[in-house]
């Protein structure tokens, strides 16, 4: 299947975002006592290159209203 390969990881923090199109949001992988999680980074949108700088992963978010609690599995692209 074309496109980036993704994995599923639990969110390290709650996530709430509204987008009018699919979005790849910058994130960081966090290793904890129970395994890996993914932490959404502060980010103001596509032109925010400073927000991208610490990212080692991207959260794959669908168009529309996305709300998820910490621990919810999220689709992730590793950088």
Image (spheres, helix red, strand yellow):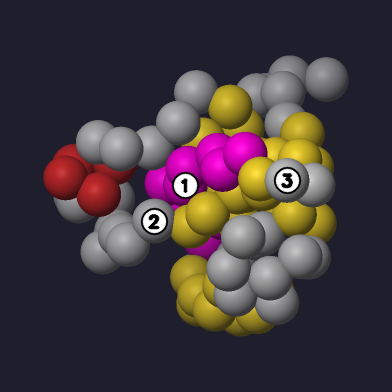
Assign the magenta stretch its main secondary structure: strand
Q: Could you tell whether 8 is left or right of 18 in the image? A: right
Instruction: State the separation of the CA atoms marked 1 and 2.
Output: 5 Å
Q: Could you tell whether 68 is left or right of 34 in the image? A: left
Front residue (pair 1, 70): 70
Asked whether disc 3 touches disc 1, contact meaning CB atoms under 8 Å apart, the reply is no
Front residue (pair 12, 61): 12
Asked whether disc 1 touches disc 2, contact meaning CB atoms under 8 Å apart, the reply is yes
Give the magenta part as a residue range: 21-31
Q: Could you tell whether 70 is left or right of 20 in the image? A: right
Q: Could you tell whether 50 is left or right of 62 in the image? A: left
Mark nearer the N terminus (1 vs 2): 1
Task: Tell me where residue 40 appears, x and y as whole percent.
Answer: 48, 57
Task: Tell me where residue 51 appears, x and y as whole percent.
Answer: 25, 49
User: Which residue is located at x 70 percent, y 77 percent?
Assistant: 69
Residue at numbered disc 3: 33
Mark nearer the N terminus (3 vs 1): 1
Task: Tell me where residue 9 appears, x and y as whole percent.
Answer: 75, 46
- Secondary element under disc 1, as helix, strand or loop, is strand
Mark nearer the N terminus (3 vs 2): 3
Quadrant containing the N terminus in the rendered view: top right
Instruction: State the separation of the CA atoms marked 3 and 2.
Output: 21 Å
Residue at numbered disc 1: 27
Asked whether disc 3 touches disc 2, contact meaning CB atoms under 8 Å apart, the reply is no
- Secondary element under disc 3, as helix, strand or loop, is loop
Instruction: State the separation of the CA atoms marked 3 and 1.
Output: 19 Å
Residue at numbered disc 2: 41
Crowding near the residue tagged with mark 2, few <14, some 14–19, many ≥20 C-alpha atoms within 10 Å: some
Query: To which quarter of the image does residue 53 belong?
Result: top left
């Amino acid at each position: 299947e074309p496109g980036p390969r993704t994995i599923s990881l639990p969110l390290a923090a709650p996530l709430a975002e509204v987008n009018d199109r699919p979005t790849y949001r910058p994130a960081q992988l966090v290793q904890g006592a129970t395994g890996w999680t993914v932490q959404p980074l502060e980010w103001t949108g596509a032109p925010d290159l400073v927000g991208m700088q610490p990212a080692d992963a991207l959260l794959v978010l669908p168009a529309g209203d996305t709300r998820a609690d910490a621990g919810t599995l999220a689709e992730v692209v590793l950088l």
